[in-house]
Amino acid sequence: MKLTNTLIAGAALAALPSFAFAQEAAAPGFDEIGPYIMTTFLFLVAGFLVFFMAAGFAMLEAGLVRGKNVAMQLTKNIALFSIASIMYWLVGFNLMYPGEFNGYLGPIFGTTTWLEPVGLDASEAALDYASVASDFFFQLMFVAATASIVSGALAERIKLWPFLIFVAILTGLMYPISGSWQWGGGWLSEMGFSDFAGSTIVHSVGGWAALAGAIILGPRLGKYKDGRTVPMPGSNLALATLGTFILWLGWFGFNGGSQLAAGTVGDITDIGRIFANTNMAAASGAVAALILTQIMYKKVDLTMVLNGALAGLVSITAEPLAPTLLGALLTGAVGGVIVVFAVPLLDKLKIDDVVGAIPVHLLAGIWGTLAVAFYTGNWGAQITGIVAYGVFTFVIAGVIWFILKATVGIRVSEEAEINGLDMAELGMEAYPEFNKG
C-alpha cells in the first residue's frame, strides 16, 4: 500500500511541471491584455475626474446665487447626481447602447436580472477594449453633467421636487435616446456627424433643456424692471472661482477619457494632445472675456471671465484632438466672445439664466460642433446634428416642463422666492450666521 501511494505521488509530481507550463501558455500575456487594462484604467481615472466636476458645478452655482438660495443649489446638485446614477443604470445605459451590454437593466430593456453584477472580467470581454463596469462608470458621469447644466440656469425660483422629476426623465430617457443617435451607433453616426466628447450631445442638450425651462418658468422677481436689467450679485465669487477651476480640472477627464483607448503609444500621445488643446481653449476663452469686458465696460467682469473659460472648454469638447494649439486657442477664444455678447442678449429677451449656462453650454456648444467641420469638411452632418438635438431636446423638455407646471407646479410662491428657497423649501440656511440677500 505504501509503495502504491509512493508511485502515485511520484507520478503526480512529475506531471506538475507540464501542468504549470500548460497554465502559463493559456494565460494571456501583457501584449494581449495590456490594452484592456490600460483602457479600463483610463475610464476609471477619467471617470473620477469628471465626477469631481459635480463638485465644480455645485461650487459655481453656490457662488453665483444669492446667499438665501445656496443650500437649495447644493441640495439639487447632490440629488441630481444621485438620481442620474440610478436612472442611467435602470434605463439609460441599455437605451443608449442597445444590445451591447446586458446586465445593467434587467427585464425592461435587457435580458438578465436586476441583480446581475456590473462588469465582466478579462476572460469575458474583448481584450482590446475595457471592462464594462469602467465604461458604464465613465458614461454615467456625462449624463450627470448634463443635468447639472439645467440646475444653475433655473436657480432661485424653481421647486425642488418638480426639478428632480425632470432630472429623472432627462437622465433616464431623453439624454440616452438622443445620445444613441451618435455614440450608440445610430443614424447621426452613420451620417458622419462628429462630436468627440459632447459639445452638442452633452452640453447643448443641457442648454436646450435649460432654455425651455427658463422660458416656461419665467425670470426671478425684480430681475427686469422698466426696461432695464437689475443686477443680482452672487453670494460668493471665491466659491464660483473655485468651482470654475474644479470644472477646468475635470475637463481633462471629460475630453481625455473620450479618446476611449489607452492601449498603444498612439493613444497615449493623442491623450496628451487632447489635454494640451483642452487647456489652451479654456485659457483663451478666459482671456478673450477678460479683454472684451475691459473694452466694453471699462472694467473686467470676473463672472464673465469664469464663464469665458468654461465656454472655451465647451467649444473645444467637440474636437479636442484634431486642432493645433493655435487652432485650440482660436476655438476657445470664440467661445469666450460668445459668452460676453450672449449674456446681455438673453437679458434683453428677458430670459433669466442665473449662472450663464445657456451661453456657455448651448451657444458655445453649437459653435464648437460647427467648428469640427473645419477639420472634417462635413458641414451638412454637423448642422443636421445640431438641429436634431436642438429640436428634440427643446420640444420634449418644453412639453415636460409644461406638464409639470400644469400639474404639480414648478415655481415657488412669491413669498418663498423673496425669503429664499433655503428656508422655504428646506428649512435651513447655508449661512445661518449671516443675512445675505
Image (spheres, rainbow, N blue to C red):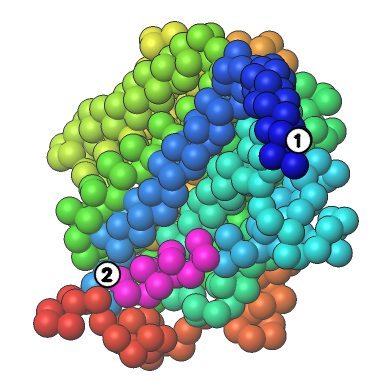
Q: Does dot 2 land on a helix, a strand or a loop? A: loop
Q: Can the viewer see residue 193 in this picture?
A: no
Q: Where residue 262 sits in the image (x, y, percent)?
A: 54, 21
Q: Quadrant of the N terminus?
A: top right
Is residue 73 located in the magenta-colored stretch of the structure? yes
Is residue 423 located in the magenta-colored stretch of the structure? no
Residue range highlighted in magenta: 70-82
309 with respect to 182 (left or right): left
The residue pinned by badge 2 equals: 66
Which amino acid type corresponds to the residue marked 1 in the rendered image?
A: Thr
Q: Can the viewer see residue 401 in this picture?
A: yes
Q: Is residue 257 above or below residue 15?
A: below
Q: Where residue 5 sits in the image (x, y, percent)?
A: 71, 38
Residue lying at 22% horizontally and 56% vertically, measured from the top left: 239
Estimate the spatial distance between the alpha carbons at disc 1 and disc 2, rounded to whole Å.
Answer: 88 Å
Which amino acid type corresponds to the residue marked 2 in the rendered image?
A: Arg
- Magenta span: helix, strand or loop, mainly? helix
26 with respect to 50 (left or right): right
The quadrant in which residue 233 appears is bottom left
Q: Residues within 10 Å of mark 2 (few under 14, many from 20)?
A: many
The residue pinned by badge 1 equals: 4
Residue lying at 84% horizontally and 33% vertically, measured from the top left: 187
Q: Quadrant of the C terminus?
A: bottom left
Residue lying at 66% horizontally and 47% vertically, measured from the top left: 119
Q: Where residue 3 sits in the image (x, y, percent)?
A: 71, 34
Q: Residues within 10 Å of mark 1 (few under 14, many from 20)?
A: few
| Foreground of the two, 170 or 227 | 170
| Foreground of the two, 21 or 255 | 21
